[in-house]
Amino acid sequence: MLAISRQVYNTMLRQPKKGKFQAELYEKFESKNNRFSTTTHVLVSATVKLARKIKLPSGLKLYRGLGRELPKSFDAEDDFGRKGYMEWGFMSTTSNEQVARQVCTLFLSCFECCPHRVLRPRSTRAPRKARQLAWCCA
């Protein structure tokens, strides 16, 4: 149930266009004018409050397994010299690199051919700022 709820909320945050992943789910709720705005607000508020109380150990290594293609903007700079992408939903991470690799293999047939599908976000104490990422290669 939790995974289904998380998918619904992330879909509502991303607002996919027709033909994109989860667009049908978004349109289903959008047609009934249900965007889960109150639920999303409560979840964000709870996350912020928890983040104030729970301190991550300094130097903790986190991993994020990607189960999809990265946009071209991740590697290619735009006119302003920026590159990367924004995760529009709640981003799950783990301190176990093997778990992140398993996420990749759930969605991709061959992890070995694309080893840089695991990101290693650097944990910082700076609230609400973009985290620096590094590739986690085998």
Image: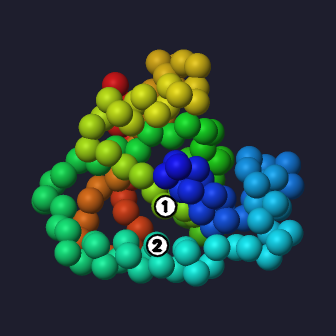
> Is residue 58 left or right of 111 when viewed as pictured?
left
User: Can residue 7 be spotted in the picture?
Assistant: yes
The answer to whether 71 is drawn above or below residue 138 in the figure is below
Q: In which quarter of the image is residue 130?
A: bottom left
The image shows residue 48 at horizontal and vertical percentages of 35, 77
Q: Find numbered disc 1 in the image and state the secondary structure of the residue it sits on.
A: loop
The image quadrant where one finds the C terminus is top left
The image shows residue 90 at horizontal and vertical percentages of 49, 61
Residue at 32 percent across and 45 percent down: it is 94
Q: Mark 2 points at which residue?
A: 43
- Closest to the camera, between mark 1 and mark 2, is 2
Residue at 50 percent across and 25 percent down: it is 105
Q: Nearer the viewer, residue 22 or 29?
A: 29
1 or 2: tag closer to the N-terminus: 2
Q: In which quarter of the image is residue 14?
A: bottom right
Circle on res. 66:
none
Q: How far apart are marks 1 and 2 (CA)?
A: 10 Å
Q: Name the residue under label 1.
A: 90
Contact between marks 1 and 2 (CB within 8 A): the answer is yes
Give the amino acid at mark 2: Leu
The image shows residue 55 at horizontal and vertical percentages of 17, 67
Residue at 49 percent across and 31 percent down: it is 104
View extreme (front): residue: 1
